[in-house]
Image: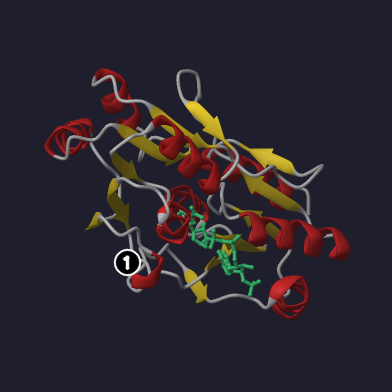
Amino acid sequence: MRILLLGGTGEARELAADLQPGIEVISSLAGRVPDPALPAGAVRIGGFGGVDGLRRWLTDSGVDAVVDATHPFAATITANAAAACTELGLPHLVLARPAWPSDGATTVPSNRGAAEVIAERGHRRGFLTTGRSSVAAFTGVDAWFLIRVVTAPDPGTLPERHRLLLSRGPYEYREEAALLTEHHIDVLVTKNSGGAMTRAKLTAAADHGIPVVMVQRPPLPAGVVTAEDAAQAAAWVRALAASR
Ligand code: NAP
């Protein structure tokens, strides 16, 4: 049995390692980061060319199923995979890691909404952890930002006053707490990514009395089958393989 595993996350790498050698896995990465952490087994890199391109790729490669283990905010590829699999009648699973509880945080639907909250409340020093494509939303806000990203945003998209921190998780509590203190952070901005790898910042913010503005997840496509973690996804793939 051969599966396409849409990846770019820790869970996807965990699943690829778990399934092989028993199952043939082709992992797919978008190609956004120059030096990606590579999963075990075959890897293809780059977009498919929308739903049509993905449908063609799925047909040509003869995969038997698709597991979408992309990030909860990677909504376009998730919608495309759901549409292509429905059209082709291919078994399809979304590995959707549970969201973080948002009690205590100010929840907003978008980065623009987060920027509005910061401006309205007069925060002066924000810690932005919402990713490189989000920073443009904060350019009009009169505040200084510590911006943590994996790859640098285009210079034209950056807020005027900021410091860039290029790094990749996971992050420990102690380093998160040190960042908040060292940079006199008075608001943390995060997506509701879920998962353990980047959760320490929430505990550190709570312990330091720093308010959190949390961008809510885009909804999943209607009717998709989901798993919560790599182990559940692996069980789904193995059950499918056994039934063939
Ligand atoms: P997105 O907005 O949903 O996707 C935009 C386009 O990128 C898709 O239409 C597709 O191009 C291509 N693409 C995305 N994921 C792909 C994959 N795994 N393999 C092949 N093509 C892919 O996605 P995104 O938010 O930019 O995320 C891109 C990648 O980074 C994903 O693999 C995701 O798991 C990872 N990631 C994202 C975040 C985040 O916050 N968004 C965080 C950590 C990791 P075509 O239409 O040409 O097929």
- In which quarter of the view is residue 36 placed? bottom left
Queried on whether the Cβ of the residue with tag 1 lies below 8 angstroms from ligand 1, the answer reads no
Which quarter shows the N terminus? bottom right
Q: Quadrant of residue 151?
A: bottom left
Q: Position of residue 182 (x, y in %)?
A: 12, 38
Left of 149 or right of it: where is 234?
A: right
Residue 226: x %, y % from top left: 68, 40
Q: How many marks?
A: 1
Where residue 148 appears, as percent x and y from the top left, is 30, 52
Give the amino acid type for the residue marked by disc 1 in the picture. Answer: Ala
**Residue holding disc 1:** 152
Give above or below for 97 relative to 240: above
In the displayed structure image, the side of residue 187 where residue 99 appears, left or right: right
* In the foreground, 100 or 229: 100
Identify the residue at horizontal 30%, vertical 42% (top origin). Answer: 127
Residue depicted at x 42% and y 62%: 39
User: Local crowd at mark 1 within 10 Å, few (<14), some, or many (≥20)?
Assistant: some
Q: Is residue 27 above or below residue 117?
A: below
- Asked if residue 107 is positioned above or below residue 6 in the image, the reply reads above
Quarter of the image containing the C terminus? bottom right
Which residue occupies the foreground of this view, 223 or 156? 156
